[in-house]
Amino acid sequence: MNERQTDRLIVSVSEKKEGALELLYGKTKNGVYAFLYPFFGNRADTEDCLQDVYIKIAEHARNYKAGTNGRAWILQIAKNTALDCKRKSKRIIYSEEISPPPQENVTQTPVFDAMNAVLSDDERYIVNMHILWGYKHREIADMLNCPVGSVTSKYKRALEKLKKYLKEAE
Amino acid sequence: MKSIKRRLKKELDSITPPFKGSGVSAEHVEAETAKKPFSMRFKAMITSACAVVCAVCILVCVFVFSPTAAIGYECVVLEINPSAVFLAENGVVTRAVSLNGDSDTVLSDGFAASIRGKKLEESIVLFVDRSARLGYLDLNAESAVRISTEKGGSKSLKKVSEALDGYFMLKGSYTAAAAREIPSGDFISLLGGTGSAAEIVNGLSLYYEERTLAGLPAEEISKTYEDNVIYGGIKNYLQGELSACIDGIERCASLTANLSVLNGDIKAHKDNPAVLIKDYFTVKNMYGDSAFTADFAALMAEADALYAEYISCGGIELNNSIELETAKAVLNSVDLEILRGLSDVFSDSAYDIFGDKIVEILNYMGIDTAFIADVVTVPEDAAAYMKEAEKLYSAQSALLEKTNRENYAAERPVISSPDYLTFKADIIAKYGSLDIFYESLAK
């Protein structure tokens, strides 16, 4: 989803238009999920945090300034929410007995797992921003304050790592 | 193997929970969310960066097959920002290829071909000089150049180092040439391949950007092109040219508006000697001053002055009223405050909105933007990509040379040999070595 569409959707959420939040969720959940996962390393906590992120988006959309960077706004909320969730989960560890998650059929996600297993933080970030958030390499270079050539070569290296890992896993 | 992108999206769709909300369909909201308009048809790529690269590292690898025979290979890696590698046979360059993105611009426009056949040290000096002309090396600032050779390449190191010292002294530039020999393995790693240095260099494409495209699928090549060429270089080119002539645009916009008013007065004047077409341009071409009354002559003189100033500010030649009115409309089509803002900060969305108009305005300021129309088609393979990218490099180098001309041509007295040696000795005393000095600048 591009910047303009994101912007309009957030504005629609702030105007409490029916279906706006659901649409925004549908279009951004993958990027937010992939962004949150490294904070927790497991799906359950990531899912819980994901819900919290969109609750916060709904609450704070009225504060969003139209025409500014909607995707970055969402990611900032996601980051802050993830940090809050981590702080809460640390407190919980000391007050509750943690029982292991029940065994259940887990959906296999080899590419996503590979992304979190073999890529460096930079590579994972670049792949997430480019593939799931639609940022151009040059925009990512601006975010990371590095040359665009670095982003392009890291992205290419990341894809090669993923392909190699997946091929060996087959 | 299916695209990584598609698989990743599909996997995430399968593991992210469904929306838990009111359950109302979002279709009507989606319908209201208009697609981003794609008004920009022509996109040009030029980087307007006049980044001054203070650190130039030249790696010289000399691999002589037979020291006693007449034939010998020398492989010179010029690691600068820009960086390039030179392959020489019998002391003469046979091939020069880029090692990073900035070098693509330096080696473009036939420059790579022009240094083939020249002596190794001469080619390197020419490369450094062109880098300086394009603003990648500031000859007015104290800086460093690092020269490295493969172990055993001290002779090439010496001759290149001496040639560079001579160049910098002549140019009056306090730039030191640091020299070092590095192990073969490290040198080969710099080139990024396997085999001998000569084999690797002969197998490399001229441009670094072309190598970054290797192995990418068509959709990635197209996306990279959009990022790097359309929303990167072309956008930056427009911004650079706009910035360079913004004052001229402001003046020409005002002058054409004033000339348009005067033209109307001329056409309506009772003493206008023309019978059918009475505008300023026709009257000027067909009648001499002697045909004018004093009053009418004063009006024509005023128009002459406006037109002359318009031309001196960079406006293109106008031949009739229609061209004048068109120029006026184009030059005044974007608010000047917006144009000035764009010359400082030019976002992608601003580019989509104003790009076409800026191309038009620059055309009316005599700036060549014809190549922009050529690069609008997004390619899907590396060869087509590079064909368009080369046009951009050429435009980039022209713009960089233009904007850096004053800095390059600044007066610098020739440095005497004792003074230059003292400069280098002072650096060694302060930093420990020229190499450390270079490293300190490169960070």
Image (cartoon, coloured by chain):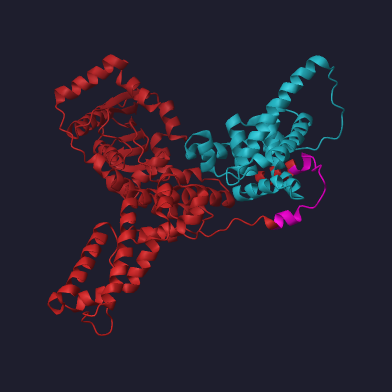
Chain colours: A cyan, B red
Task: In this rendered view, identify the residue nearer to me: B52 or B180.
Answer: B52
| Residue B99 position by quadrant | top left
Q: In this view, does B224 lie above or below B430?
A: below
Q: Please state the horizontal and vertical placement of residue B397, each as a whole percent of the image.
A: 34, 48
Assess whether residue B14 is covered by the magenta stretch: yes
Q: Is residue B207 above or below residue B305?
A: above
Q: Please state the horizontal and vertical placement of residue A75, each as a whole percent of the image.
A: 64, 36
Q: Is residue B121 above or below residue B286?
A: above
> Which stretch appears magenta?
B13-31
Q: Is residue B21 visible?
A: yes
| A65 to the left or right of B409 | right
What residue appears at the point 50 percent right and 36 percent down from the top-left corner? A150
Task: In this rendered view, identify the residue nearer to me: B315 or B40.
Answer: B315
What residue appears at the point 51 percent right and 54 percent down from the top-left corner? B352
Location of the C terminus of chain B by quadrant is: top left
Assess whether residue A26 is covered by the magenta stretch: no
